[in-house]
């Protein structure tokens, strides 16, 4: 099956052909660990988790390597550490902040059903690789030392001949425009306004490492160099897919390309650049100042992780998402319906073909989810003319097991309905034995036409948050099932 992906660099959907199908390599920029992640940060994690799952499905689990870094050196981390642990030496305080935030991040994205990446490298463990790239750039004439800083020069890059890409080509901006748009109060250690920091001196007490390029003062890396170093170490000089949120295209990814291509004399850092759109809340940009800032943790208090995940995937990854409570309520209903439909059936060996085709078309999760709806609700007419309809034999147990296998490829419905119910019930502090006894007593009352008693039991269960549904089994005998009320 052919996978097509939209590439931010060439601005077109292209057939994806891995450099080495036995080693498909993807890098995604991960979190800076200083605070709880917000629901916008969850978007790239979920989107690229689906891509990871799809690549594993297409190329084999052992053939895909997914690297997502952890940025554990940053001014925001230092500020937070100084604020939260004023009595501790800064380095110790920083370790506390980063370890704790990393744990929170893992708990959050685990609850959203995301697989752990193959490698999760930390910036502070790759300072050697950063220094080595910086040395290459200085030797190659792409970077220079000034006042204990090392600066990258996009001007030098664009003046060089050969295979190198043009600086600005990923973000589709020209260097002249960038120079014209740059602010006047340029830092004194920069020769040109567009030059960016690869390495800077550390203030006393701040984390510091021996500097590259003959600088005597200890220092620390700039942000962009981290990802060039970690992707190089774990994926090589060029690899297949590089992803992140749309806000990272410029300057972060543009600068990563500049560093990596100039250091390794290559024309491409990644074959395909993928960027997810932004998440808005109730029609407004999500920001701390507007007060509409929601952490993943807060949402997980109110909604199961799967509901949040489905709600995220309903929108195509490149479109903006408007995050609303109404959307979450609808997603919860859809998931309930699917769980009821599949029950505890084992997944089919393979997911549905039309479903997978939707995903291979630039990760069209909205179309894939529409296909799941169709599988869960086969149109009546198609059931009647079964065999010739596009659903083929996808009704009954076959539809259930294929829906299950397909949803699992999206990281949904990974448990059986009984298990899900059990955990919902446990979380709600409800005793299943007691419910079953009451349902049994109600059935006896109904058999004896004692409607008053039957209603009383129904009300008693309702007060416990349990809603009854009366129906018939395959033989036409009355059966009562139950759900937790929302
Ligand atoms: P940051 O911690 O700000 O570097 O962000 C981590 C990741 O989350 C990056 O890939 C960002 O592009 C992404 N991101 C941040 N805010 C949003 C948002 N509101 N919607 C979608 N992605 C976001
Ligand atoms: Zn990055």
Image (cartoon, grey):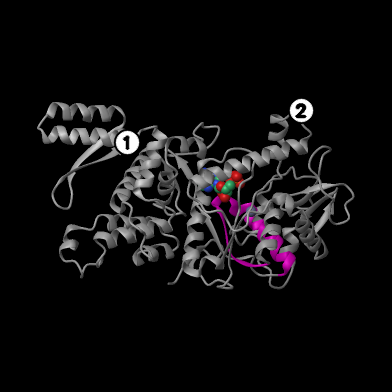
Magenta span covers which residues? 237-265
Label 2 lies in ligand 1 vicinity (Cβ under 8 Å): no
Question: Which image quarter: residue 462?
Answer: top left
Q: CA distance from mark 1 to mark 2?
A: 52 Å
Q: The C terminus appears in which quarter of the rendering?
A: top left
Res. 15 in view: no
Q: Is residue 251 inside the magenta stretch?
A: yes
- Describe residue 244's horizontal placement relative to residue 401 as left or right: right
Between residue 2 and residue 440, name the one nearer to us. 440
Q: Give the number of the disc on residue 87.
A: 2
Instruction: Judge from the rendering whether residue 439 lies leftward or rightward of residue 217; answer left or right.
Output: left
Residue 460: percent from left, percent from top: 25, 27
Depth-wise, is mark 1 or mark 2 nearer the camera? 1
Q: Determine which of the numbered discs, if any, sits on residue 433 in the image.
A: 1
Image quadrant containing the N terminus: bottom left
Q: Is residue 390 left or right of residue 17?
A: left
Q: Are marks 1 and 2 in contact (CB under 8 Å)?
A: no
Labelled disc at residue 131? none
């Amino acid at each position: 099956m052919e996978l097509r992906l939209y590439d931010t660099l060439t601005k077109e959907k292209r057939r994806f052909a891995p450099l080495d199908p036995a080693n498909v390599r993807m890098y995604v920029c991960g979190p800076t660990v200083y605070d709880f992640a917000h629901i916008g940060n969850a978007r790239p994690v979920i989107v690229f988790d689906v891509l990871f799952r799809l690549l594993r499905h297409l190329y084999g689990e052992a053939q895909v390597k997914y690297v997502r870094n952890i940025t554990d050196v940053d001014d925001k981390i230092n500020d937070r550490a100084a604020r939260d642990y004023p009595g501790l030496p800064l380095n110790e305080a920083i370790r506390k902040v980063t370890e704790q935030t990393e744990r929170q991040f893992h708990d959050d994205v685990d609850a959203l059903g995301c697989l752990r990446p193959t490698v999760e490298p930390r910036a502070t463990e790759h300072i050697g690789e950063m220094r080595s790239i910086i040395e290459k750039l200085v030797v190659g004439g792409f970077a220079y030392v000034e006042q204990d800083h090392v600066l990258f020069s996009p001007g030098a890059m664009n003046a060089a001949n050969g295979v190198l890409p043009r600086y600005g080509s990923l973000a589709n901006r020209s260097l002249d425009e960038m120079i014209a748009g740059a602010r006047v109060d340029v830092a004194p250690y920069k020769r040109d306004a567009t030059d960016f920091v690869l390495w800077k001196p550390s203030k006393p007490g701040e984390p510091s490492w021996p500097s590259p390029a003959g600088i005597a003062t200890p220092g620390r890396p700039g942000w962009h160099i981290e990802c060039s170093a970690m992707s190089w170490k774990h994926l090589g000089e060029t690899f297949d897919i590089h992803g992140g949120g749309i806000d990272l295209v410029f300057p972060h990814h543009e600068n990563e390309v500049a560093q990596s291509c100039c250091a390794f004399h290559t024309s491409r850092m990644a074959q395909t650049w993928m960027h997810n759109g932004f998440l808005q809340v109730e029609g407004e940009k999500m920001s701390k100042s507007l007060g509409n800032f929601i952490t993943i943790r807060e949402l997980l208090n109110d909604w199961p992780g799967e509901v949040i995940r489905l709600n995220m995937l309903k929108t195509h990854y490149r479109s903006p998402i408007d995050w609303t409570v109404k959307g979450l309520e609808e997603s919860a209903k859809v998931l309930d319906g699917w769980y009821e439909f599949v029950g505890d059936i084992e997944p089919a060996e393979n997911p549905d073909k039309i479903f997978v085709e939707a995903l291979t078309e630039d990760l069209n999760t909205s179309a894939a989810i529409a296909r799941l709806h169709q599988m869960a609700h086969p149109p009546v007419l198609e059931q009647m003319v079964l065999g010739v309809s596009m659903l083929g034999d996808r009704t009954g147990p076959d539809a259930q097991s294929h829906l299950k296998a397909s949803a699992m490829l999206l990281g949904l419905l990974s448990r059986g309905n009984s298990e899900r119910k059990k955990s919902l019930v446990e979380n709600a502090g409800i005793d299943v034995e007691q419910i079953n006894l009451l349902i049994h007593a109600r059935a006896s009352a109904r058999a004896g036409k004692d409607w008053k008693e039957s209603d009383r039991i129904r009300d008693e269960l309702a007060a416990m948050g349990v809603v009854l549904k009366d129906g018939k089994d395959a033989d036409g005998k009355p059966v009562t099932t139950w759900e937790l009320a929302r």
